[in-house]
Amino acid sequence: MTAEFELDQSVEGYIGWPHGGITSAILDGAMTNWLFAHGLTGVTAQLNVRFRHPVKLNEPTRVTARLQRASHPLYILEALITQDSQLKVRAVGWFLHKEHHTERP
């Protein structure tokens, strides 16, 4: 699954860069949407994000997500943010199938 977009100053952290929380949310959302696109629902159990290079504002940006492993009820996905074909941020997320998620009392 792939999406293309640009980030603007409304999400700026340090000058010229988006806040890392925004970047992390984009990666998490891409992986969740991969699940939705394949008829699955899941909640994020763990999210590991590796920031390799700063993401630049107002530049064409691509996020891609793919399944790494599935062992029901756990799905492990990877998402990447790239600009100009350079890997900027990588995340691996562990998602628990929603039916198996325990609700708090």
Image: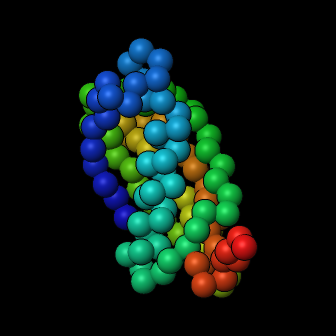
Residue 103, position in %: x, y?
A: 67, 74
Horizontal and vertical percent for residue 52? 57, 33
- Residue ranking furthest to the front: 105
Toward which corner of the image does residue 33 lie, by quadrant? bottom left
- The quarter of the picture where residue 8 lies is top left
The answer to which of 23 and 77 lies nearer the viewer is 23
Name the residue: 60% across, 79% down: 97
Residue for point 45% across, 57% down: 29
Question: Is residue 38 shown to the viewer in this render?
Answer: yes
Quarter of the rendering occupied by the N terminus: bottom left
Q: Left of 57 or right of it: where is 13?
A: right
User: In the rendered view, would you say 78 is above or below 69?
Assistant: above
Q: In which quarter of the image is residue 104?
A: bottom right
Please state the horizontal and vertical placement of residue 63, each as a whole percent of the image: 39, 50
Residue 36 placement, left or right of 99: left
Please name the residue shown 38% across and 18% down the image: 16
Q: Is residue 53 above or below residue 46?
A: above
Circle count: 0
Give 16 or 1, whichever is nearer the viewer: 16
User: Is there any visible trace of residue 69 in the rendered image?
Assistant: no
Q: Horizontal and vertical percent for residue 98?
A: 58, 78
Going by the image, does 26 lie left or right of 48? left
Placement of the C terminus among the 4 image quadrants: bottom right
At a point 53% along the width and 69% down the height, the residue shown is 67
